C-alpha cells in the first residue's frame, strides 16, 4: 500500500470497551503518514470485516468475556479466519485483542482462544512481590527484533502505556518482537506472518503509539 492509496481499516466492535479513541488514533496516524484515502470503520459486520484491507481487534476486560463477545456475533469468527488466516490481511490485536490470538486464556478457568499463535495467557507474576498487579502506566520497550516493520522508527527504551493483570507466555521465542521489564519479561509486541499484537495501548502511547499504528497501516507482510 502506498502513502496515497485508498485503504480501509476495520476496528472490530464486539462489546469490549470504547473503540472511539482507537479509531481516532488510527485516523490521525493515517493522516500524518499520508494515507489520504484511508477509511476507518468501527463495525461488527462480518461482510465489512471480510472486505477490509487492515483489521484491528481491540479488547479490554477478562479474556473469557472478550472471547464470548466475539463468538456471540454471528459469522464474526468465520469472517476473521477467512480474512486474516486464509487471505493474509494484516491484523493487529490490542491488549486483550492480542491475547485472544493465543491457544487459551487461564483467567478464572481455562478458556480457548483463537489459536493463531503458540502462546497462553496467564496472570502476571513479577519476581519482585512488591510490584503491584495490574501492571499499569508507562514502561520502556525492549526491542527483541528491532528490524520488525512495526518497530520502524521506534527507539529502544521508548515509553508505552500498559494496563493489564494477565499477559502472554509465548511457546515460540520467535513470536516476541518487543517486551517490557516488570521484574520479568512482559511480552509487549508479538507476531508472525501477517499477525501482530500489542499488550500496550498504542492509542494511549502518544507519539510512539501513533508511529506503530502508522507502521501497521503501511505494512505489507
Image (tube, rainbow, N blue to C red):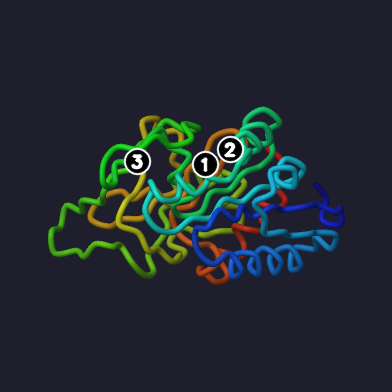
Q: Quadrant of the C terminus?
A: top right
Q: Which residue is mark 3?
A: 105
Q: Which residue is mark 2?
A: 77
The residue nearer to you, when weighing 174 against 112, is 112
Mark 1 closeness class: few <14, some 14–19, many ≥20 residues within 10 Å: some
Label 2 – label 1 distance at C-alpha: 6 Å
| Disc 2 crowd, CA 10 A, few/some/many (<14, 14-19, 20+) | some
N-term mark: 3 or 1: 1
Measure the alpha-carbon separation of dots 3 and 1.
15 Å
Marks 3 & 2, CB-CB < 8 Å contact: no
Q: Could you tell which of marks 2 and 1 lies nearer the N-terminus?
A: 1
Callout 2 secondary element: helix
Q: In this view of the protein, which residue sits in the foreground, 181 or 122? A: 122
Residue 203 pos. (x, y %): 55, 66
Q: Residues within 10 Å of mark 3 (few under 14, many from 20)?
A: many
Q: Residue at x 74, y 68 (%)?
A: 32
Image location of residue 12, percent across then percent down: 61, 52
Q: Which residue is drawn at the image coordinates 35% and 41% (left, top)?
A: 105
* 54 on left or right of 197: right
Residue 71 badge: 1
Q: Secondary structure at mark 1?
A: helix
The answer for how far apart the CA atoms under marks 3 and 2 are is 17 Å
Is 73 located above or below residue 221 in the figure? below
* In this rendering, position of residue 136 left or right of residue 175: left
| Quadrant of the image occupied by residue 212 | bottom right
Q: Residue at x 58, y 48 (%)?
A: 92
In front: label 3 or label 1: 1
Asked whether the beta carbons under mark 2 and mark 1 sit within 8 Å of each other, the answer is yes
Residue under the point 49% across and 62% down: 201
When asked about the image quadrant of residue 31, the answer is bottom right
Q: Position of residue 178 (x, y in %)?
A: 44, 49
Amino acid at each position: 500500500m502506498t502513502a496515497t492509496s485508498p485503504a480501509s481499516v476495520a476496528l472490530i466492535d464486539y462489546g469490549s470497551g470504547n473503540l472511539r479513541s482507537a479509531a481516532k488514533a488510527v485516523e490521525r496516524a493515517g493522516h500524518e503518514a499520508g494515507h489520504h484515502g484511508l477509511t476507518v470503520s468501527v463495525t461488527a459486520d462480518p461482510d465489512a470485516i471480510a472486505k477490509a484491507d487492515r483489521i484491528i481487534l481491540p479488547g479490554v476486560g477478562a479474556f473469557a468475556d472478550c472471547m464470548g463477545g466475539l463468538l456471540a456475533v454471528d459469522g464474526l469468527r468465520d469472517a476473521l479466519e477467512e480474512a486474516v488466516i486464509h487471505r493474509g490481511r494484516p491484523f493487529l490485536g490490542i491488549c486483550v485483542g492480542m491475547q485472544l490470538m493465543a491457544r487459551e486464556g487461564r483467567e478464572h478457568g481455562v478458556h480457548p482462544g483463537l489459536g493463531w499463535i503458540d502462546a497462553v495467557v496467564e496472570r502476571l507474576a513479577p519476581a519482585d512481590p512488591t510490584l503491584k498487579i495490574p501492571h499499569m502506566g508507562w514502561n520502556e520497550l525492549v526491542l527483541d527484533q528491532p528490524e520488525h516493520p512495526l518497530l520502524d522508527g521506534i527507539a529502544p527504551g521508548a515509553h508505552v502505556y500498559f494496563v493489564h493483570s494477565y499477559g502472554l507466555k509465548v511457546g515460540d521465542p520467535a513470536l516476541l518482537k518487543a517486551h517490557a521489564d516488570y521484574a520479568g519479561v512482559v511480552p509487549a509486541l508479538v507476531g508472525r506472518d501477517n499477525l501482530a499484537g500489542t499488550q500496550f495501548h498504542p492509542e494511549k502511547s502518544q507519539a510512539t503509539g501513533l508511529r506503530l499504528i502508522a507502521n501497521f497501516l503501511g505494512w505489507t507482510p
